[in-house]
Amino acid sequence: MSKLPTILHISTPKSWRGGEQQIAYLYEELNLRGVKQYLLCPKDSEMSKKGKSLGWNIIERRKTMAIDPFFARKVSLVCKQKKIDIVHAHDSHAHSFAVISASFFGNKTPIIVSRRVDFPISRSSIKKYNHKSIKRIICVSDAIKRLIEPDIINKTILKTIHSGIDLNRFSQIEKKDKKLHKEYNIPFDTPLIGNVAAIAPHKDYFTFINTAETLVKKKYNLKFIIIGTGPMEEEIKNYCNQKKLNEHIIFTGFRTDIEEILPELDIFLITSKTEGLGTSIIDAFACKVPVVATRAGGIPEIVKHEKSGLLANVKDSDELANQVERILKGSVNTSKIIAGQQDIITNFTKSATAEKTLLEYLSLK
């Protein structure tokens, strides 16, 4: 494909989370490179609202069920009407619609699938991943690529392209603002340990709270900040209450001022049990905040132990607390860790992600 291809992105969630942010970054960066794009998404979804506000080529279709033949037919119609060269499916339902479009509506447009989740392909989905129209499966980490490789017949279609962030988002931030300290009446000399993530099962906030409990029992004067919301919010709040940690753990809810509050954290603590990559870690790197994380999924591809952060095994709250304690006690050279972060971060920018994705588009014949 010598000329720049015309792309149809498909995104099916109605909410806005990390995957949707990655699509937005990709769309913006490809626009700068002159790529013509359309984005098919559910009517009144957060993606639709965002895209319309930015003047993107948004195409809406009501999504009435997980496997919606009318949505799949819409994929075929758009490909024909807009002369689409490549369909890029960005989530599982988008993948299904693209394959149904090919199998039942005669759509011959090549399909690229993004795989962001850190768990094996289900038995019922193996056929979908090996459909003849799928020309690339882009994994956001090598960990995901290794995980799904056994189920992919043509392994040459598997590619790793790490997600990226907007480095400029944090470029003007001043750490001295102490916005969280002021808002929650926390003494300025109290260290903050926090995470920015949906309160969802795979983020394993139970381990986050267990880690906090260990450190509180050791009489450290800390505040733990949970930034985000999600389906497990009430359950996690109840668990926090059971542990009698309410005065130590603050739930901020959903925030639109991450650029202002993330740099205020003294330690970024992520306790996920599965994680495709963990772009919130890259955000923390951009803010020069030391990171303590689990070895879940693609996290070790960003956090190199004692080089760009500190690692512990999944669900090991004692070891996570130990790694936090090492930073608090000054037994780790945090300047060296932060320097290591800055060495890595240039490989995880939205520009780098878009450039590598465009090369995959252009490689299709």
Image (tube, rainbow, N blue to C red):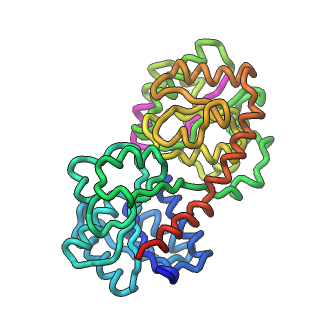
Residue 119 placement: quadrant: top left
Q: Position of residue 261 (x, y in %)?
A: 68, 44
Residue 220 vs residue 126, the one in the foreground: 126
Residue 211 placement: quadrant: top right
Q: From where the camera sits, is residue 146 visible?
A: yes
Residue at point 77%, 42% (across, down): 175
Question: Residue 344 vs residue 85: left or right?
Answer: right
Q: Is residue 156 above or below residue 244?
A: below
Residue 337 vs residue 57, the one in the foreground: 337
Q: Position of residue 221 (x, y in %)?
A: 68, 20
Q: Where is residue 296 in the image (x, y as percent from the top left)?
A: 47, 36
Residue at point 66%, 24% (across, down): 222
Judge whether residue 51 is colored magenta. Answer: no
Judge whether residue 223 is colored magenta. Answer: yes
Q: Is residue 85 above or below residue 196?
A: below
Question: Residue 307 vs residue 10: left or right?
Answer: right
Residue at point 22%, 70% (across, down): 69
Q: Where is residue 168 in the image (x, y as percent from the top left)?
A: 71, 58
- Count of numbered circles in the view: 0
Residue 48 placement: quadrant: bottom left
The C terminus appears in which quarter of the rendering?
A: bottom left
The magenta span reads: 222-237
Residue at point 35%, 73% (across, down): 110
Q: From where the camera sits, is residue 17 visible?
A: no
